[in-house]
Amino acid sequence: MVEPIFISGFFLDYVLPFVLVFTLIFAILSKTKLLGEDKKQINAIIGLIVGIILLAFPFARNVVVQLMPFLAVSAVILLVFMLMYGFIWGKSEDVLDKGMKITLAIIFSLGLITALLFITGWWTPVYDFVFGRSGGSQVWINGLLIIILAVAIIAVIKGEKKSE
């Protein structure tokens, strides 16, 4: 059976990293105008050379190939976070007060983290670490103390600003 071109090893290991590096170098040189105004041919040649050099070194190419899935997943997580941020802090008529917005932001952030833990399969190890072991209660007590200290420090700092 013939393998589709987009998942073939040649395409994933050589074509995509080359195009990515070429495009990035070309865009950086064009945007910064490092070599001067209207030097697109020179920028393209340098991008081409750097892209070919990347292909010549397997370690560097593998680093680029292995970082791209992380970049894609991070971009999607950032997109979801920014959508939730826009829902809460958007430029709508301020129906919600600031405290409610902060509360919703915390709830949505915890929901996103929980969803990521479920999707990646890390929910069970995290749950077992926090609740399932004999020292789980100590983790919660230490976390609560850290939160209390942080709130106290914030209260002191805000109190100093108001008294001035």
Image (tube, helix red, strand yellow):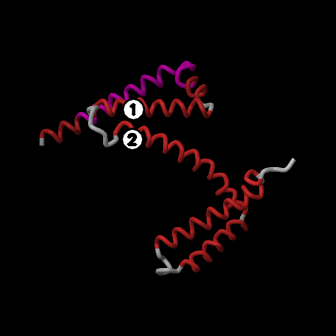
The one nearer the camera, 63 or 95, is 95
Tell me, yes or no, whether the two marked residues, 1 and 2, touch with CB atoms within 8 Å: no
Q: Which residues are magenta?
A: 129-155
At 47% from the left and 76% from the top, the residue drawn is: 33
Query: Residue 93's x, y, as percent?
Result: 27, 38
At 24% from the left and 33% from the top, the residue drawn is: 155
| Residue at image mark 1 | 106
Residue lying at the far right of the rendered structure: 1
The one nearer the camera, 84 or 110, is 84
Q: CA distance from mark 1 to mark 2?
A: 14 Å
Badge number at residue 86: 2
Eyeballing the image, is 35 above or below 80? Answer: below
- Does 78 sit left or right of 6 as displayed? left
Q: Secondary structure at mark 1?
A: helix
Q: Secondary structure at mark 2?
A: helix
Quarter assignment of residue 58? bottom right
Closer to the observer: label 1 or label 2?
Answer: 2
Query: Residue 115's x, y, as percent?
Result: 54, 31
The one nearer the camera, 140 or 68, is 68
Magenta stretch containing residue 17, yes or no? no
- Does 53 sit left or right of 140 as displayed? right
Amino acid at the residue labelled 2: Gly
For the C terminus, which image quadrant?
top left
Quarter assignment of residue 57? bottom right
